[in-house]
Image (cartoon, rainbow, N blue to C red):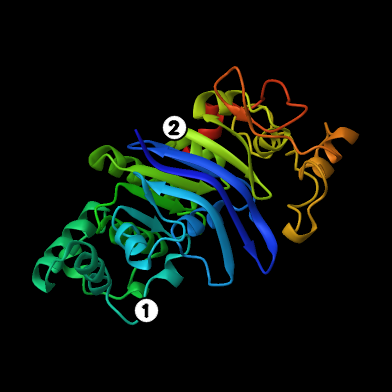
Amino acid sequence: MTFVSIRDLKVSFDGVQVLHGIDLDVSRGEAVGLVGESGCGKSVTWLAALGLLPGKARVSGSVLVEGQQLINAKRSSVEAIRGGRVAMIFQDPSSSLNPVRTVGRQICESLSLHRGLDRRSGRVEAIRLLDMVGIPDAANRVDLFPHEFSGGQCQRVMIAMALAGEPDLLIADEPTTALDATIQAQILDLLAMLRRETGMAMVFISHDLGAVGAVCDRVNVMYAGRIVESGDIGPMFDQPRHPYTRGLFDAIPRLDGNRDRLIPINGTVPNPSMLPPGCAFAPRCTKSSNLCSLQLPELKPQQDARHLACLYPVGPALVTKTQAKKRVNA
């Protein structure tokens, strides 16, 4: 059953378009990955969907949460969903937590806003949430300030705050980027455990394919404000068909076999105000032809139940889902 349905979502800043018609569905209980290099539009997609972009942003399209439209809806209607039914974890907890308020007070604020709990009940629930996300000695540490927690623990506090509204969908925006490998694995295990226990859906935004492979059921690959390939995690990881997706896999370090030199994707994501004609990836693609510079490929369904936007898709991948996961589990 579809919980969130995004159709033809477009975003522009000062006349420069950065999202070019995103179509995306999230069903109840499933985990969907959104991957790509920095600047591809992953975070902007969900900030736009939840009405969190600055006033100069121009947003069009449709975002339905179980039939309720969020685009151009009244602020009160959006706020009733944002933080309650749909919660978001941001990638930098140090800038998201208020440094002059205890973590307990910040969690209690969410509990009061979304669940109507009073101060005493909120404190009890805040302790329970901190304990749920693995904060040791939660009853005493609830009165500590953010600087008294490690980076990994601050991320756990952010997850506790997101869970305060008992959301149906949790959007995790690169929640492991600023953490070391061991803490990354712990946060991924925590998110997977919370999904099993609460039944909530999750959107996992990351540039790390290994992390996505560890927690997601489906994956969408974004490039220059468009989805270029999407499908179930197994077929996508075993045989990525878009040259950009394949390039992301070729850049993953291998932990078994020969220690070969990594194969980078030449160039960088283009500036949204200077997109090339045709396929935006063509200048960096080793398989492109003159046709790629003239024709913008549409995202079309394929025989293997995935969607692909490419005129010259590639063959089998050299990196499997299991190998990608080793990057996280190492």
Image side of residue 122 versus residue 192, left or right: left
User: Which of pointers 1 and 2 indicates the residue nearer the eye?
Assistant: 2
Indicate the amino acid at tag 1: Pro
The residue furthest left is 120
Most distant residue in the bottom direction: 100
Q: Position of residue 24 (x, y in %)?
A: 50, 41
Distance CA(mark 1)–CA(mark 2): 36 Å
| Residue placed furthest toward the top | 303
**Which residue occupies 90% across, 35% down?**
290
Give the mark nearer the N terminus: 1 vs 2.
1
What is the secondary structure assignment of the residue under circle 1? loop
Q: Which mark is residue 99?
A: 1
How far from the left and from the top, in percent, is residue 179? 48, 56
Please state the horizontal and vertical placement of residue 117, each as a whole percent of the image.
Answer: 13, 66
Q: Which residue is mark 2?
A: 217
Amino acid at circle 2:
Asp
Residue at far right of view: 290
